[in-house]
Image (tube, helix red, strand yellow):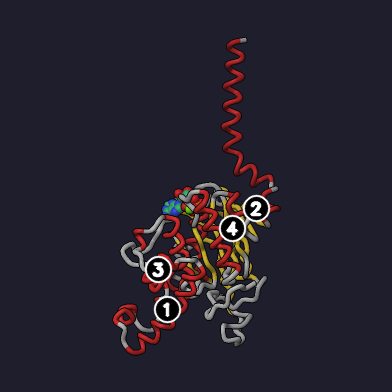
């Protein structure tokens, strides 16, 4: 439900709700002897917040890198579906399919697959507004330099892009920080700017790699709310990587669980929470520790008894 009227749709996908948007099909990725991903298959549906969770080293970032064309898996395919619905002006868009596993990263980005990284990758000395404008460069016919110099057609283009960027600033409530250098902002706000920059691309699919990593509880809650706003108000499909299971359960429509590079569960948050394999993967380490403590206690009792 849209509660605010936006002049521009921040959602770049013309897929109808509920249709498959991205298919990960039997993907395997190795680094020498390390199997980062093994036979991973699942589907991301248009309009979902789709979480990918799993312990550290499970292969979550590798999977995201495969989707964005940074890594090319040795086996399997990743397909992005486009069209089948209407564009911003209400014209119907024919269905299409793109094999992301055969494209370089810049071509995947041009298809509107936007991402944020596990570490902040912003220009620290530039303002929030400037960082967001740079997020628009993918759509600019005239160079960023010409726009900054403020010439004829570049100026008209700049104004149009500026409108869209202002909508992102509004959505993510960055008004107060608009002209501040990003490097001077609190960590949680920098992560929000990064989210905003990805949104400025008008993504067909937004990939977020641990956007809440390193945050305190309050910042995490804030970020979760902004991710929900991006989804509910702007209608963008989101893939959200996180290793804290509790954080994602509230805001996700669907959850895929990776463990040692394998998909061990895929379903609604409730289905996944109740899955014995997931409980094992998450609690296995704790249980092992508990057993050691128990055995040590038994050993002491035996010694004293
Ligand atoms: N560029 C790389 N070169 C070698 N090994 C890698 C590379 N990227 C990831 N890996 C390995 O793949 C596995 C999965 O890592 P990663 O995808 O970063 O996990 P996660 O994001 O779930 O913590 C790990 O064993 C990691 O060391
Ligand atoms: Mg990672």
Which circle marks residue 51 in the picture?
Answer: 4
Please tell me whether mark 4 or mark 1 is closer to you in this view. 1
Which circle marks residue 113 in the picture?
Answer: none
Q: Quadrant of the C terminus?
A: top right
- At horizontal 58% and vertical 12% (from top left) the residue drawn is 303
Please tell me whether mark 4 or mark 3 is closer to you in this view. 3
Please tell me whether mark 2 or mark 4 is closer to you in this view. 4
- At horizontal 50% and vertical 66% (from top left) the residue drawn is 172
Residue 269's x, y, as percent?
66, 54
Q: Are marks 4 and 3 in contact (CB under 8 Å)?
A: no
Residue ID for mark 3: 178
Q: Tell which residue pokes out farthest to the bottom in this image.
A: 152
The kind of secondary structure element at disc 1 is helix
Please tell me whether mark 1 or mark 2 is closer to you in this view. 1
Give the answer, above or below, for where 195 lies relative to 248. Answer: below
Q: Quadrant of residue 83?
A: bottom right
Is tag 3's residue or tag 1's residue first in the polypeptide sequence?
Answer: 1
Quote the CA–CA distance across marks 4 and 1: 31 Å
Is tag 1's residue or tag 2's residue first in the polypeptide sequence?
Answer: 1
Viewer-closest of 155 and 75: 155
Q: Is residue 12 left or right of residue 119?
A: right
Residue ID for mark 2: 265
The kind of secondary structure element at disc 3 is loop
Is tag 2's residue or tag 4's residue first in the polypeptide sequence?
Answer: 4
Q: Tell which residue pokes out farthest to the front in this image.
A: 176
Residue ID for mark 1: 162
Is tag 3's residue or tag 2's residue first in the polypeptide sequence?
Answer: 3
Is tag 4's residue or tag 1's residue first in the polypeptide sequence?
Answer: 4
Q: Are marks 2 and 4 in contact (CB under 8 Å)?
A: no
Quote the CA–CA distance across marks 4 and 3: 30 Å
């Amino acid at each position: 439900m849209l509660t605010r009227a936006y002049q521009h749709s921040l959602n770049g996908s013309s897929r109808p709700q509920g249709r498959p948007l991205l298919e990960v099909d039997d993907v395997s990725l190795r680094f020498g002897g390390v199997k980062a991903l093994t036979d991973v298959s699942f589907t991301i549906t248009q309009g979902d917040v789709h979480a990918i969770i799993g312990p550290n080293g499970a292969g979550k970032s590798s999977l995201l890198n495969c989707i964005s064309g940074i890594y090319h898996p040795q086996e399997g395919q990743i397909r992005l579906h486009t069209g089948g619905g209407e564009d911003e002006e209400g014209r119907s868009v024919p269905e299409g399919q793109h094999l992301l596993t055969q494209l370089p990263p810049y071509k995947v980005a041009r298809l509107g697959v936007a991402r944020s990284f596990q570490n902040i990758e912003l220009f620290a000395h530039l303002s929030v507004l400037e960082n967001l404008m740079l997020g628009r460069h993918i759509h600019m016919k005239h160079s960023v330099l010409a726009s900054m110099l403020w010439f004829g057609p570049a100026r008209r283009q700049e104004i149009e892009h500026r409108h869209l960027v202002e909508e992102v600033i509004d959505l993510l409530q960055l008004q107060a920080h608009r002209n501040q250098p990003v490097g001077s902002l609190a960590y949680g706000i920098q992560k929000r700017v990064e989210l905003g920059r990805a949104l400025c691309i008008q993504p067909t699919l937004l990939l977020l790699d641990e956007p809440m990593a390193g945050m305190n509880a309050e910042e995490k809650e804030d970020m979760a709310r902004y991710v929900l706003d991006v989804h509910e108000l702007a209608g963008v499909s989101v893939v959200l990587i996180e290793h804290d299971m509790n954080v994602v359960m509230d805001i996700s429509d669907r959850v895929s669980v990776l463990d040692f590079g394998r998909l061990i569960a895929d379903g609604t948050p409730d289905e996944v929470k109740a899955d014995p394999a997931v409980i094992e993967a998450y609690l296995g380490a704790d249980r092992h520790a508990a057993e050691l403590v128990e055995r040590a206690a038994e050993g002491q009792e035996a010694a004293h008894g």
